[in-house]
Amino acid sequence: SYFLFNFLDVEDSNVYFSRLNYLSGGNVFIYYNGQMAFLSQLVAYLLSIFPLFIQAIGYMLFSLISFLIFITLLSRVVQNNLLILLFVCYIGAFFPLLFYNLTNSIWPGLLITALIPVVALKENRNLTWTEFFLVIIFCTSQAPVLTTLPLYLFLLNRNVFDLRILFLIFWLLMFSLFVMPNWDSQRADMSLIMKENIVF
């Protein structure tokens, strides 16, 4: 019940939920806070045909599944179940929004995109088809996913030539440079952000 009553705990989720349930005639995807969280908005749009209670469950389940995929990948890298359990307990105690809030699923999405090539490199193999489709889905979570690009370039360089990795590199670049960021927004102005941080 805690999850169901708090699924709108972050303002982005309120924006997506309200637009798709109470406004008509607008665009499905919008720029909000300097970027388009494509995956979160797509999930909100697909769930908007259902009753509100089902939407709440859907928001929560998507976030929970995203987090479980992230934890599964992390455990394959760390290979220490006790550390993973402590990490999950820490998140549950101090940042449970990752478990149930649609907006915060962008962070597991970014980490899933980063961990998949790390797992492939650690196991010295190419990506599986499941991993390929997971990257296709989760790299559309937010614009900073571009930071994972070096991992895919390294994977491409290290393994036998694989068209799937080339496609993922193209997909990452297309979404993180052309689809998701709103370059006219102050939130996407890196020089302004750095200057404000230095002043702060």
Image (cartoon, grey):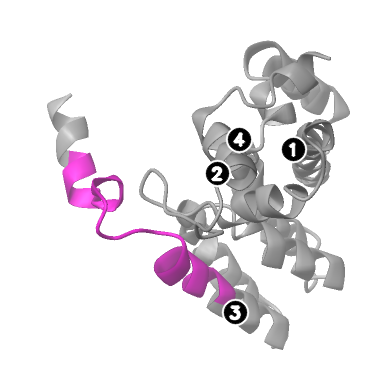
Query: Which of marks 1 and 3 precedes in the sequence?
Result: 1
Q: Amino acid at mark 2?
A: Arg
Gap between marks 4 and 3 measured at Cα: 33 Å
Task: Tell me if label 3 and label 1 are in contact, CB under 8 Å.
Answer: no
Gap between marks 3 and 1 measured at Cα: 38 Å
Task: Tell me if label 2 and label 3 are in contact, CB under 8 Å.
Answer: no
Residue depicted at 60% across the width and 22% down the height: 9
Where is residue 30 shown, x and y percent of the image?
Answer: 46, 55
Gap between marks 2 and 4 measured at Cα: 18 Å
Q: Which residue matches tag 4? A: 104
Where is residue 195 shown, x and y percent of the image?
Answer: 14, 39
Q: Which residue matches tag 3? A: 157
**For residue 122, which quarter of the picture?**
bottom right
Residue depicted at 80% across the width and 40% down the height: 58
Where is residue 166 shown, x and y percent of the image?
Answer: 61, 83
Circle number at residue 19: 2
- Assess whether residue 149 is covered by the magenta stretch: no
Gap between marks 2 and 3 measured at Cα: 44 Å
